[in-house]
């Protein structure tokens, strides 16, 4: 067995150089988890991170508990505590999503962050909670040194075309299909 030791980082960040646009999409589990893994890496190297949760409201998500205790990260939940019905979009669903996009735009352009994550923004765009053209404009306006991650099912073809990296999470098998409910600490 090899002994491991903690990585000691001075928490000083180096500029990223070219910031990428990354899209995590698909019907499989793991899109937000992949983005949060990158967040952990970024924070471990002293980078400054902003996260906007588009579809997730004030719910006891484990990631929010740990993120609140970490330096160099700000996050905001703009979603409802109830699931949004795509067949019955409410005005305040659109309003919250619009606030999330406006806040994300401010974060991307502020110069205060190295990495900005727009969690579930692909769903928000697909369900017309946010204007896809506004999201495209945000990507075009993104400063060259900022990394931008967009997560969620149904990423639009324009977003995929504009991205530097696209990963599709493919569902092959999932416990939900057998009636297993989301597990605290693993699924939320």
Image (cartoon, rainbow, N blue to C red):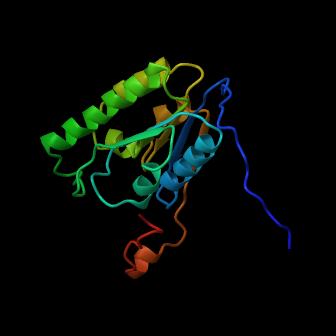
Q: Does residue 162 appear to the left or right of 55 in the view shown?
A: right
Observer able to see residue 136: no
Residue 173 vertical placement versus 148 (above, below): below
Given the current orientation, which residue lies at the most extreme left position? 91
Q: Does residue 104 appear to the left or right of 23 in the view shown?
A: left
Which residue is depicted at the point 46% across and 58% down? Answer: 27
Whole-percent x, y for residue 134 in the image: 35, 25
Q: Quadrant of the N terminus?
A: bottom right
Q: Does residue 163 appear to the left or right of 137 in the view shown?
A: right
Q: Does residue 53 appear to the left or right of 40 in the view shown?
A: left
Along the line of sight, the residue nearer the viewer: 113 or 139:
113
Which residue is depicted at the point 18% across and 46% down? Answer: 89
Q: Quadrant of the C terminus?
A: bottom left
Whole-percent x, y for residue 58 in the image: 27, 53
Given the current orientation, which residue lies at the most extreme right position? 1
Whole-percent x, y for residue 42 in the image: 61, 41
What is the tally of numbered marks visible in this picture?
0
Residue 75 vertical placement versus 19 (above, below): below
Which residue is depicted at the point 45% across and 42% down? Answer: 155
Observer able to see residue 57: yes
Whole-percent x, y for residue 26 in the image: 49, 53
When asked about the image quadrant of residue 135, the answer is top left
Along the line of sight, the residue nearer the viewer: 55 or 13:
13
When asked about the image quadrant of residue 183, the answer is bottom left
């Amino acid at each position: 067995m090899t002994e491991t030791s903690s990585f000691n980082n001075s928490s000083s960040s180096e500029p990223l150089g070219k910031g990428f646009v990354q899209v995590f999409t698909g019907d499989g589990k793991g899109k937000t988890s992949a983005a949060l893994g990158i967040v952990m890496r970024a924070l471990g190297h002293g980078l400054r991170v902003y996260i906007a949760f588009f579809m997730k409201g004030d719910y006891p998500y484990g990631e929010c508990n740990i993120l609140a205790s970490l330096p160099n990260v700000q996050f905001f939940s703009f979603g409802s505590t109830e699931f949004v019905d795509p067949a019955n979009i409410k005005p305040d669903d659109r309003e919250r999503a619009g606030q999330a996009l406006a806040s994300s735009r401010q974060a991307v352009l502020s110069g205060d962050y190295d990495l900005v994550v727009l969690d579930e923004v692909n769903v928000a765009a697909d369900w017309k909670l946010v204007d896809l053209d506004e999201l495209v404009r945000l990507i075009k306006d993104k400063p060259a040194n900022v990394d931008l991650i967009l997560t969620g099912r149904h990423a639009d073809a324009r977003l995929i075309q504009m991205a530097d990296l696209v990963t599709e999470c493919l569902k092959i098998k999932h416990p939900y299909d057998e009636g297993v409910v989301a597990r605290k600490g693993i699924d939320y």
